[in-house]
Image (spheres, grey):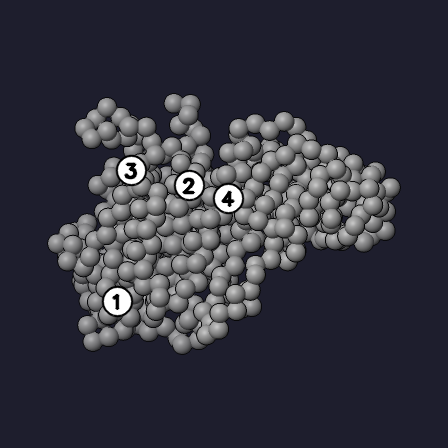
Amino acid sequence: MEFTIKTASPERFRTGLLILGAFVGAPLPATSRAVDEASQGRLSRLVSDGELGDKAGATVLLHGLAGVAADRVLLVSFGKADSFGDKSWRDAFAAIGKALTTTVAKDAAIALDEAEIPPGRDAVWALRQASRIVADGAYLFEPASAEKKHKKKRGPNKVAFIVPAAVDETQEEALRQGRAIAEGMALAKDLGNLGANVCTPAHLADTARGLGRQYKFEVEILARDDMEKLGMGAFLAVARGARQEPRFIVMHYHGGKPGKGKGGKAKSPPVALVGKGITFDAGGISLKPGAEMDEMKYDMCGGASVIGLFKAIAAMALPLDVIGIVPAAENMPGGNASRPGDVVRSLSGQTIEILNTDAEGRLILCDALTYAERFKPACVIDIATLTGACIVALGKIPSGLFANDDELAEALTQCGIDAGDRVWRLPLWEEYQDLLKSNFADMANIGGRNGGAITAAAFLSRFASAYKWAHLDIAGTAWLSGEAKGSTGRPLPLLAEFLLARAAARKHY
């Protein structure tokens, strides 16, 4: 989907579909009012008669509106004016994205009025978020089928944003950023939605390699032998039961300004992102129940979000240095699988008693967190579908956030609000460490039934003391179940917003 910005009179703009906004119980915004006057009050009568629903995202489609150049006009509700904010704005643009997937119009235009930008936000924010939401709304996963139906995809290829003031470079850049983030989300969703027989550790590695070739960044792939030489005993303990060979994927994006040091290294340390890449989680010897086990193909969504994010930051040419690490493996039962009671030595040298083989994510992540130390990162963020306990605690609305640094936690929280991809911070008090005691190793890999999301994070914190670190538990937000089953692409919008904010801050150094 191609986005452009136009300064034009909406009633005179020739397009297949013109999209306008309205509030319930308030005058029409200026752009909608211009179309209303051209159509002799058609829109205002429609609103006053109650044809447009009160709820943000309600729509009414009009054909051949007199006095208007567009073939069709879609009126979208922003809800009640006195309660207008980020959520109602996002609901309206999500409805716009959905409407664009069903229209037969070949092109479309969205008239964005200043009155339709939430309080405290500006046009740059609105254009970046709107283009991302609209483009993401057009996402379609092509299911495997014996018959290739080759249905022609509905919806416009070109969407113009009509703005009331002159266009500047920051607005054009915001559109490009939103589209790039949506493209990264699409890749993350594709990887998550593929069956585990297709999206194997090798497939994740090949995808990362392909992005590296396309966008000219370095990708390293470590195989089992490499990991054995390094001493990644925790990671390899998880991979023992599977026939699919594990991969340890390391992506190096060098967008920051080169420094004066040897090899032209960047002046600022990189941000490191670590994504859990369990391409299928059967639980190992601690086998999961059979019901809904198919959804365990989504246990690599943390890794998918990191790979998708690298596509987005490369497309945006973000002026930062970023390291992406994806430990990828399957967790399967088998004659060579790790057993409850086994003790393994991690890359850090710390030993772990495996009490439950289904608590495998923390085992692959701990070696990845130790590996990240070599890059001397400014901060490390790991992203993982780690615990069902996080869903019990928070539901499926925010991702769980844990951090050993308040400033990093606050930045992620604010970026989550800005991106509409929220997180909620949970404690990492020292008292929780006592639950990980083991008689046979430095620690156990589980801490009992209570506070499971917290004890999992407490476990990871033992491997992240060398730098500022945050952990995102996305078990409740990475995918949807039921009729809408599929990957959500979260928390890629949050992470992109975080990196964009750091890039903007660097301009003032």
Q: x%, y% of residue 159?
A: 60, 44
Q: Is label 2 or label 1 in front? A: 2
* Alpha carbons under labels 2 and 1: distance apart: 31 Å
Q: Which circle's residue, 1 or 4, is located before the other in the chain? A: 4
Q: Amino acid at mark 2?
A: Ala
Left or right side of 429 for 264? left
Q: Quick one: label 1, few (<14), some, or many (20+) residues within 10 Å?
A: some
Q: Which residue is mark 4?
A: 179
The picture places residue 321, in percent across and down from the top left corner, at 33, 36
> Of all residues shown, which one is farthest toward the left?
229
What secondary structure is marked by label 4?
A: helix
Distance of mark 4 from mark 2, alpha carbons? Answer: 9 Å
- The numbered mark, 4 or 2, whose residue comes first in the sequence reads 4
The one nearer the camera, 157 or 433, is 157
Amino acid under label 1? Gln
Counting residues from the start of the chain, the first of labels 1 and 3 encountered is 1
Structural distance between the alpha carbons of marks 1 and 3: 31 Å
Marks 1 and 3 close (CB-CB < 8 Å): no
Q: Which quadrant would residue 295 be assigned to in this image?
A: bottom left
* Above or below 267: residue 1: below
Find numbered disc 3 in the image and state the secondary structure of the residue it sits on. loop
Image spot of residue 68 (x, y percent): 78, 42
Task: Decide which of tag 2 and tag 3 comes sooner along the chain.
Answer: 2
Say if mark 2 contacts mark 3, CB within 8 Å.
Answer: no
Circles 2 and 1: CB atoms closer than 8 Å = no
**Residue carrying label 2:** 315
